[in-house]
Image (cartoon, rainbow, N blue to C red):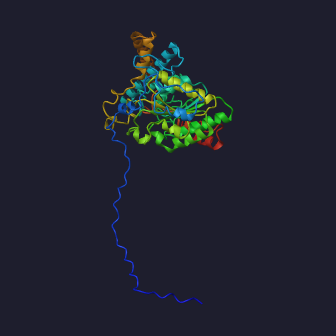
Amino acid sequence: MASDPPEHSGPAPAPAPAPTATAPTPAEALRLRIPEPVRSTSPAGRILRHLSPAGEMRKPELDEKVERIALMRKQLVRVIDDDGQAVGPWVPELSAEQMRAGLRDMLLVRSFDARLLRAHRQGKISFYMQCLGEEAIACAQQRALQPGDMHFPTYRQQGLLIAAGYPLIDMMNQVLSNEHDPLHGRQLPVMYSSKSHGFFSISGNLATQYVQAVGWAMASALRGGTAIASAWIGEGASAESDFHAALVFASTYQAPVILNIVNNHWAISTPEEFARGASATFADRGFGFSIPALRVDGNDYLAVYAASQWAVQRARANMGPTLIEWVTLRVGAHSTSDDPSAYRPADDVAGFPLGDPIERLARHLTVIGEWDDERHTALMAEVAALVDTTFEEADSQGSMKSGNVSSPRTMFDDVYATMPRHLREQREQVEP
């Protein structure tokens, strides 16, 4: 039986005071980090933050630990200095003849671009995209790879095909979409494709080529092959999820692939900060996935060749992927549909500290006694004449605008190794 509660002596305790309502302390409003307005800083200002003198950056061993290579991701591999000399540990073993071939490749790309841009202004083609100022990146890397390797390019790597010797007439017919177009009008202009020249079909959906390149490289290894892949993307499209998915697979399976990021500082209408985020460089992306990453002067033909060769050697030695940020500048408009004056400073090209890739290689050849103004003028004339003559031939075969196009029947081709009966029947019903 419970006992009675104890008796209390003295006055009863006062009741506890009711809680007093207090106003909440005002909190600081949440906010986002918005990249600086596009006209506030030029590419020159952004590059100068991480600009290394030519020859300063060391060359790591192929099997060097990624943590040590990561310490270099804010530097810049450069070979040709301001005096035109090739200096430092990255100087590649290229003969004067090989360098002259590289110079011709770049001049041919630039002349090709100029002629097709003029064709657009003349109303002969519907669309075009230049790689003005970026010629060294594709041309030099192509020379560092071998037949059988496969590039997965964007729409600004026409230099890969030209440096590989792909016929200019085929490229022009494809842009004109005439009946001699090797793709039969089934691609947009400038979206080339050539398996025989290691140039995978360009996809208009940006970044999809990155995962495809890693998958192709994995398949090459699973087959016991020796061919490697090279993936290409612009800095703007590196914000796409496919880019990050590709890095996960490349890192996990140590795929034999080169992961190129062409940082030309401008996406279609936004500066690089929008895609780079809070990272100091795009090379930081590689370190986040434990992939060795370099930043390279993309307007230095010798530096591009040397860094590409280093990445190729790593891939062929089963040391896995390499990520390379190529620092360059998109000199022209994004495409013939773009007006860059609406979003970028008018003087950013003039103040760009890495110069012009063609002029820099020509100067180096001149300094070592393997080039001069007379030979340069002659080569420019030769290349321009070749491009003009080839375009005249392609133009004489008509274009999409003139109605000289491939037969609609070709829509059924190149899908099946053996065309099924129902498609053969449908094909016969189409007017030739």
Which residue corresponds to the image point at 34% horizontal and 71% vertical from the top-left? 21
If the image is split into quadrants, where does the C terminus sit? top right
| Residue 93 image position (x, y, % from top left) | 54, 17
Which residue corresponds to the image point at 53% horizontal and 30% vertical from the top-left? 182
| Residue 99 image position (x, y, % from top left) | 49, 16
**Can residue 183 be seen in this snapshot?**
no
Left or right of 175, for residue 67: right
If the image is split into quadrants, where does the N terminus sit? bottom right
As displayed, is residue 245 above or below residue 220? below
| Residue 139 image position (x, y, % from top left) | 49, 24
Relative depth, front residue between 28 and 121: 28
Which residue corresponds to the image point at 40% horizontal and 40% vertical from the top-left? 273
Give the residue furthest to the right.
Answer: 224
As displayed, is residue 153 above or below residue 383? below
Which residue corresponds to the image point at 40% horizontal and 24% vertical from the top-left? 115
Residue 383 lies in quadrant: top left
Relative depth, front residue between 113 and 387: 113
Residue 292 lies in quadrant: top right
How many badges with numbers are in the image? Answer: 0
**Can residue 343 be seen in this snapshot?**
yes
| Residue 116 image position (x, y, % from top left) | 41, 27
